Structures are given as C-alpha cells and as structure tokens.
C-alpha cells in the first residue's frame, strides 16, 4: 500500500490533489468571501491587513508580491501605503481574483496591481525580482509549506521582507474557550448558511486548529533561510504577524 503524501484537512492524499481541492473550494465561496471576512472578524481584518502591509517596508518603486491574494484586499492596502510601488497579486483560484477586480480601480492606478493565476509552490516570477512579499491567511492552505518558503526566498531581493499574517491558537485562557466555540460551532454554522458550501468553513476551522504555533512557524522561516525573524500577536494571539528578511547581499 502506498503511503499518503500528505495529511490534509481536505482529505486529499497528495499535495497536488490538496491544491486542486483548496482552489475549487475558494472558487465556490469567492462571491461571499469579502462579506464573510468582515462579518466574522467584526471588521478587525481591515486593521490586520493594514499592519501586514506596514511591516513590508519596501524601497520606493519596487514590485511587491502578494501571494494568495484572494480578492486583493492586501494588494490594495500595499498600494495605498506604497503608492509608487506595483503589486503582483497571485492566487490559484481565479474566481477570487475576479471578485476583487473592481478594487483595482481604487486610487485610480488600475495598472499598478496585476493579478495572475498561479500556484504559490511554483511562482512565475524571476529570481530576486520582488521588493517585499506578503501572504495573508494563505500559508496554512499551502502544502508542503517548504515549497512556498523556497519560492518566496527565491523571488525576493536580498534584504527584502516576507510578511505573513495567519491565525494563531489564542494565547489567553479566556479567549481560548471563546475562540474554540467560534471555530467549532459558529464559523461552520454561519459559513454553511451563508456561503452555501458546507465544507469550506469547516475546513477553515480545521486548518486553523492544526496549524503550527507562532514559534514553530518562526522556526520554519529561519529554516527556509530568513533572518531577523519576529512575530507580533494581535487580538490576544488569535492572529499573528510574522516578519523575516532575506539576508542582504554579502551577508
Ligand atoms: C483565506 S484566502 C486569503 C485571501 C487574501 N489574502 C485575504 O487576506 O483575504 C486564501 C487564499 O489562498 C489561496 N491559495 C491557497 N493555496 C494557494 C496556492 N498554493 N497558491 C496560490 N494561492 C493559494 C486561495 O485560493 C485563497 O484565495
């Protein structure tokens, strides 16, 4: 009997199959994604993305990678904070990118964000071409994560930052109970009723619970070659911002 290649919350036994299932799932919920995001986080997601973009700190005029861009909220925020940069918004679920298309017009620089359908495990970008990279609520969907880190490292310029926004486990006891109730009951209930995809928000809860904690994620970034790695808890550890730098040339 062949051993499954991966243990995925989608039930897929290979990484390729996992990717297909994740892309299809986000494709199905794309129309509801923004509404549910803001509703389920009580609007906090806007602040989280602001902090993510702030941490990117690119030099002026750079091209920035926003991987797992989805409906491009992070891409738009990057452009708002760094108006002289461009953003490559990459995601493998085309309906997600399409649902965010109208946002590209914000600020009147439609051509400054270019959406591309692509898999984060094999980026269609040249080596050392990006002035910073972000990924919001995307890294936990990618298996194996090492492939994504390797690609981030390859396409970033020396000294450029990788900034990751991801759910944490909720550090304080009182929060943990509320958070678990939210993940186990409320999220699947609301997700099922509204998005019409019975599995999608259960998958979301499952991936959050099985995701490595903030220290393990920091270790993964260091193992991938990033330095000056740090993380910042938000909302009592329910969300973490992780930052690392590709070593500068000559280091
Ligand atoms: C939870 S959404 C996050 C979207 C956006 N970053 C945000 O902050 O709202 C996760 C996104 O990751 C994308 N994704 C997951 N695995 C991916 C992969 N291997 N390559 C590219 N995109 C991927 C999904 O298609 C989905 O749009």
Image (cartoon, helix red, strand yellow):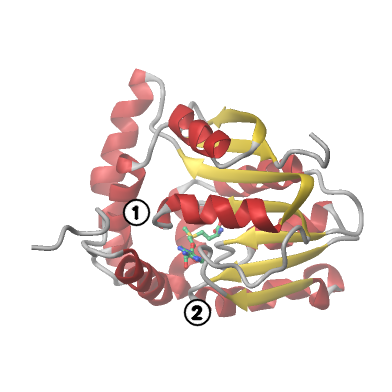
Q: Quadrant of residue 178?
A: top left
Q: Which residue is mark 2?
A: 95
- Identify the residue at horizontal 24%, vertical 66% (top origin): 198
- Could you say which is closer to the camera, residue 3 or residue 152? 3
Disc number placed over residue 102 in the picture, else none: none
Residue 216 left/right relative to 11: right
- Could you say which is closer to the camera, residue 170 or residue 224? 224
Quadrant containing the N terminus in the rendered view = bottom left
Cβ of mark 2 under 8 Å from ligand 1: the answer is no
Cβ of mark 1 under 8 Å from ligand 1: the answer is yes
Disc number placed over residue 204 in the picture, else none: 1
Q: Position of residue 101 (x, y in %)?
A: 65, 78
**Is 155 drawn above or below residue 227 in the view shown?**
below
- Could you say which is closer to the camera, residue 5 or residue 163? 5
Quadrant containing the C terminus in the rendered view = top right
- Identify the residue at horizontal 52%, vertical 55% (top origin): 148
């Amino acid at each position: 009997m062949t051993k499954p290649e991966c243990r995925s919350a989608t039930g897929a036994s290979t990484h390729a199959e996992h990717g297909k299932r994740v892309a299809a799932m986000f494709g199905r919920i794309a129309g509801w994604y923004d509404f549910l995001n803001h509703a389920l986080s009580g609007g906090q997601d806007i602040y989280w993305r602001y902090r993510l973009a702030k941490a990117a700190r690119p030099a002026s005029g750079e091209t920035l990678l926003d991987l797992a861009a989805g409906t491009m909220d992070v891409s738009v925020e990057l452009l708002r904070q760094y108006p002289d940069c461009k953003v490559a918004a990459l995601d493998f679920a085309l309906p997600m990118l399409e649902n965010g298309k109208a946002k590209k017009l914000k600020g009147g620089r439609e051509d400054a964000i270019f959406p591309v359908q692509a898999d984060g495990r094999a980026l269609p970008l040249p080596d050392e071409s990006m002035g910073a990279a972000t990924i919001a609520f995307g890294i936990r969907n990618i298996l194996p994560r090492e492939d994504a880190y390797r690609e981030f490292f390859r396409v970033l310029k020396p000294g450029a930052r990788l900034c990751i926004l991801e759910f944490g486990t909720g550090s304080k006891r009182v929060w943990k109970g509320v958070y678990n109730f939210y993940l186990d009951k409320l999220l699947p209930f609301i997700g099922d009723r509204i998005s019409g995809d019975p599995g999608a928000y259960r998958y979301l809860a499952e991936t959050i619970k099985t995701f490595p904690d903030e220290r393990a994620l920091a270790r993964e970034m260091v193992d991938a070659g990033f330095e000056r790695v740090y993380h910042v808890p938000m909302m009592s550890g329910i969300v973490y911002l992780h930052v690392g730098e590709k070593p500068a040339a000559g280091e």
